[in-house]
Every structure is written in structure tokens, then in C-alpha cells.
Amino acid sequence: MALNTQPNLTRPDDFYEALLDMHRDLDDAASQSANAQLILLLANHIGDYATLVEAIQHAREGVVSPHGPAPAHARLST
């Protein structure tokens, strides 16, 4: 199964709202737990190891600069 990285959500705005609602009123630990549970449910649904590893690589590339992670002081300032 090839990883589809093209827009594919039938109701992207509704999905985003549902994702935000999932986190509403949760502390950081509960929010991270909800994210982990959602990831594992979706990974189980996909089922294909190669596709999941490709998705992991894409996700990591989306947050890690080619020059390495930003210094801690730069990550903390907003």
C-alpha cells in the first residue's frame, strides 16, 4: 500500500474541528495520551508496516530541520 500524501479528507474542516474537540479540556498529559491512542487506532486500521514506516518518516521530516533541531532557547520562544 503506497502512502497517499495528497489531500484526501472528504470533510477536512469538520475533521480538524473534531480533532480540536478531542483535546478540549485535557491537560498536556491527557492530550498526548489521546494523540497516542488515535495514532495507534489509525495505524491498526492501516495495518501495512511499510506504509506506516513511510508515514513516520514523512512526519519526522516535517518537524526536523535539515540542519538538526533548533537550540532549546529558540524552541521555547514564540
Image (cartoon, grey):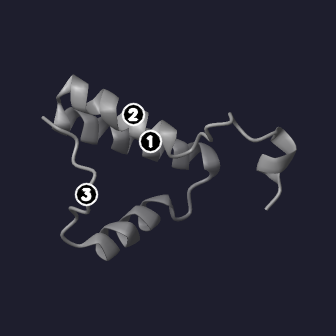
State the SS at label 2. Answer: helix
The answer to whether the residues at label 2 and label 3 have Cβ atoms under 8 Å apart is: no
Instruction: Determine whether, in the image, residue 28 is placed left or right of residue 72.
Output: left
Instruction: Determine whether, in the image, residue 66 is placed left or right of residue 62.
Output: right
Query: How many numbered circles are shown?
Result: 3
Which of these two is toward me, 2 or 39? 2
Residue under the image location 50 percent in, 39 percent down:
61
State the SS at label 3. Answer: loop
Q: Nearer the viewer, mark 3 or mark 1?
A: 3
- Amino acid identity at mark 3: Gln
Q: Residue 18 occupies which quadrant of the picture?
A: bottom left
The disc at residue 59 is 1
Q: Disc 2 or 3, which lies upstream in sequence?
A: 3
Q: Residue 64 occupies which quadrant of the picture?
A: top right
* Above/below status of 19 relative to 17: above
- Amino acid identity at mark 1: Ala
The answer to whether the residues at label 1 and label 2 have Cβ atoms under 8 Å apart is: yes
The answer to whether the residues at label 3 and label 1 have Cβ atoms under 8 Å apart is: no
In the rendered image, the residue lying farthest to the right is 73
Residue under the image location 75 percent in, 41 percent down:
70
The disc at residue 56 is 2
Badge 3 crowding class, 10 Å Cα cut-off, few under 14, some 14 to 19, many 20 or more, is few
**Horizontal and vertical percent position of residue 21:** 43, 67
- Amino acid identity at mark 2: Ile
The C terminus sits in image quarter: bottom right
The disc at residue 6 is 3
Residue under the image location 21 percent in, 48 percent down:
4
In the rendered image, the residue lying farthest to the front is 66
